[in-house]
Amino acid sequence: MGRDVLSKIIYGARISVIIAGISILVSGALGTVLGLVAGYFGGWIDAIIMRLVDISLSIPIVLFALVLASVLGPSQTTVVTVVVVLLWSRYARLIRGETLTVVIQDYILRAKVSGSSDMRIIFKHVLPNVANSLLVLATLQVGFVIILEATLSFLGAGIPRPTPAWGLMVADGRDLVISAWWVSLFPGIAIMLVVLGMNLLGDWLRDRLDPKQRQI
């Protein structure tokens, strides 16, 4: 159709970054709070939250997205909702595990004996000690969110036309692979480079922030 592929890729990058940022911020905040509460208090609270995590992890991604898109219609809100529903459980499970190793430390017990409230202990003593793991997971999830958004857009359950999105660009060029291969190739390369770059950044942060991974 004579449209500038490079301009659409650049504009589509903005869409992907916005969706990834909002989705990871919301799902990360929700999952972190629930993970801290589950790991700190334990008991029936932990059991309920972990069963919700199991339910969330068992949801088929594509099927859930298609059902939600048919109800709400394809939009950025639909994509963000799907990502939040699917991602918060990963944060909750990770943060819960990290919290369980922190709450048994002596300084936590001393804080309880000194009369500090549970919320003060959670956000002042526990959260800073799990922040590194949270940062690494959030970085690694950027690539997953971009691929998921592109997949949903490719299937017609994500970003609606005519908004330029990488998944839509790949879908538009699937029937033109022989005559106009660049329509699908360059958006695919953009997705690959961004996902690879974020995964490498996440691996670097993990090695940098984890004392066990550092080389002397």
Image (tube, grey):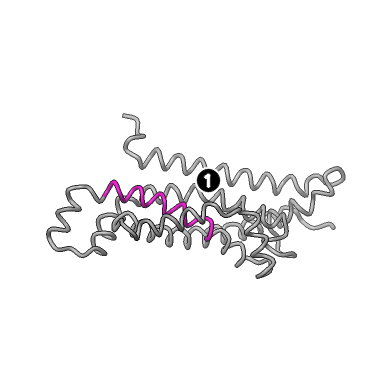
Q: Main secondary structure of the magenta part?
A: helix
Q: Amino acid at mark 1?
A: Met
Q: Residue furthest right?
A: 179
> In the image, what residue occupies the spot 62% across and 60% down?
15
Q: Secondary structure at mark 1?
A: helix
| Percent x, y of residue 5 | 75, 53
Q: Residue furthest bottom?
A: 72
Q: Say above or below: 18 vs 151.
A: below
Read off the residue under disc 1. 198
Quarter the C terminus occupies: top left
> In the image, what residue occupies the spot 29% across and 60% down?
123
| Percent x, y of residue 124 | 25, 59
Quarter-wise, where is residue 19 in the image?
bottom right
Q: Is residue 88 magenta?
A: yes
Quarter-wise, where is residue 12 in the image?
bottom right
**Is 15 situated left or right of 212 in this image?**
right
> In the image, what residue occupies the spot 72% across and 46% down?
186
Q: Say above or below: 75 vs 96.
A: below
Question: Which of 2/85 is in front?
Answer: 85
Q: Residue furthest top?
A: 216
Q: Is residue 113 magenta?
A: no
| Percent x, y of residue 91 | 44, 53
Q: Which residues are magenta?
A: 84-102
Question: Which of 183/127 is in front?
Answer: 127
Question: Which of 133/33 is in front?
Answer: 33
Quarter-wise, where is residue 192 in the image?
top right
